[in-house]
Structure formats: structure tokens, C-alpha cells
């Protein structure tokens, strides 16, 4: 399934679109819109960008779009791509088993930037249709705003964590990180 620049599928309310083939699209472009549901099957290429459902980096709450990608990939053991941007959000992201999160760069080029909330809750519990396996986060910066400490929260929380791997992950501006 190939998307030209500006190409988009709009899924109507109450409808589900299941993608069961590889997608060719710019990681930074929105390709799905509408109130309906988009899911990925086992024949997809097991990679999804947080921007495909609407994360832009220039709004304060990208959490719904990022969480959508995390939920989709945990079911099929896939990779969530974080493009070059600063993604701000106001609700902690929940990372389930079987998920790889991969930034497209290092240090401040691909940033998760929580605002007045923890950054991520790494939860190794299986999701519906998934298995307990591993979680990997790589090539990403988590930039705290310092407020998680004030609420007694950790920037990164581990729950039921089994085989969590972090590679080239930078955590900045937070007294209590994990």
C-alpha cells in the first residue's frame, strides 16, 4: 500500500480498517484520519509511525496518536517509529510487551517530552492477542519537565518488566528518572 505525499485514508465512525500488507509512506506524514479504527495484521511490515494517525510534534498532546501506535505494534510484535521531532504530551504513555520504539536519530532529534506527567510506563503485561516478550527503546531522548518529581512520579516506570532493553536512550532534566 503506497501513499503519495498528502495521501490519506479516512475511516468512518464505527468502521475498522485492517492493513495486512506493507505500507510505503513518509514517516512524518499523516496517512490515516477519521474516527474509525485502524489495525495492522500479521502480513504488514510490522512498523508504524506515530505521525501516521496524527502526531505532529507541534501540539501539546500527541499522546493519543503515540499510544495508538504503541497499542497496534504490541499485538503484532512490531516497531513504533518516532520521527525527528519533539513530541509533547500530557498523559503517560504505556508501553506493552512485544514493542520496539525506535527514534530516527540521537540526542535531541527525536524527543518524547512529557508535560506535567510521567514519560512512560513500561508494562510487560500482555495485551489482547499478544504475548509476554520484550520491550526495546532505542535512539530516543526523554526530556522531563521536572514536574514528575513534584508529584512523586518517576519519569520512567517499570511494571511486570521482562527483558527490557534500552539503547542510546538519553534522559534529561529530571531528578528521579527510573
Image (cartoon, rainbow, N blue to C red):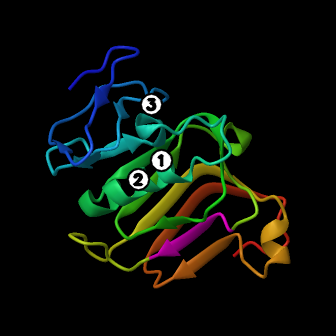
The location of residue 47, given as percent across then percent down, is 33, 43
* Foreground residue among 24 and 165: 24
Say which element carries label 1. Answer: helix
In x, y percent, where is residue 172? 80, 57
Q: Residues within 10 Å of mark 1 (few under 14, many from 20)?
A: some
Query: Most prominent secondary structure in the magenta stretch?
Result: strand
| Residue 137 is one of the magenta-drawn residues | no
Point out the stretch of residues depicted in magenta.
118-123
Query: Within the magenta stretch, is there residue 121?
Result: yes
Q: Give the spatial CA distance, label 1 vs label 3.
A: 13 Å
Q: Are marks 3 and 2 in contact (CB under 8 Å)?
A: no
Give the crowd class for mark 3: few <14, some 14-19, many >=20 residues within 10 Å.
some
Residue 91 in picture, x, y percent from top left: 61, 62
Residue at x 25%, y 72% (from the top left corner)? 128
Q: Nearer the viewer, mark 3 or mark 2?
A: 2
Query: Mark 1 touching mark 2, by CB under 8 A?
Result: yes
Residue 49's quadrant in the figure?
top left
Q: Residues within 10 Å of mark 2 (few under 14, many from 20)?
A: many
Image quarter for residue 18?
Answer: top left
Q: Give the total number of marks visible in the rendering.
A: 3
Precedes in sequence: disc 3 or disc 2: 3
| Residue highlighted by disc 3 | 27
Question: In whole angstroms, how far apart are the C-alphas of marks 3 and 2?
Answer: 15 Å
Tag shown at residue 68 = 2
* Mark 1 or mark 3, whichever is nearer to me: 1
**In screen coordinates, is 72 left or right of 62?**
left
Residue 65 - label: 1
In the rendered structure, the answer to whether residue 4 lies left or right of residue 158 reads left
Amino acid at each position: 500500500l503506497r501513499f503519495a505525499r498528502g495521501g490519506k485514508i479516512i475511516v468512518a465512525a464505527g468502521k475498522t480498517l485492517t492493513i495486512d500488507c506493507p505500507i510505503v509512506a513518509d514517516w512524518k506524514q499523516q496517512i490515516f484520519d477519521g474516527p474509525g479504527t485502524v489495525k495492522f495484521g500479521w502480513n504488514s511490515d510490522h512498523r508504524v509511525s506515530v505521525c501516521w494517525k496524527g502526531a505532529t510534534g507541534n501540539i501539546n498532546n500527541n499522546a493519543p496518536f503515540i499510544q495508538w501506535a504503541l497499542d497496534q505494534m504490541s499485538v503484532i510484535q512490531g516497531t513504533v517509529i518516532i520521527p525527528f521531532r519533539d513530541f509533547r504530551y500530557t498523559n503517560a504513555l504505556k508501553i506493552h510487551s512485544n514493542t520496539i520504539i525506535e527514534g530516527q536519530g540521537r540526542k535531541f532529534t527525536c524527543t518524547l517530552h512529557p508535560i506535567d506527567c510521567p514519560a512512560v510506563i513500561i508494562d510487560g503485561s500482555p495485551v489482547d492477542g499478544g504475548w509476554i516478550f520484550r520491550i526495546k527503546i532505542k535512539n530516543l531522548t526523554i526530556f522531563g519537565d521536572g514536574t514528575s518529581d513534584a508529584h512523586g512520579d518517576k519519569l520512567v516506570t517499570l511494571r511486570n518488566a521482562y527483558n527490557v532493553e534500552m539503547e542510546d536512550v538519553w534522559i534529561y532534566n529530571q531528578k528521579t528518572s527510573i
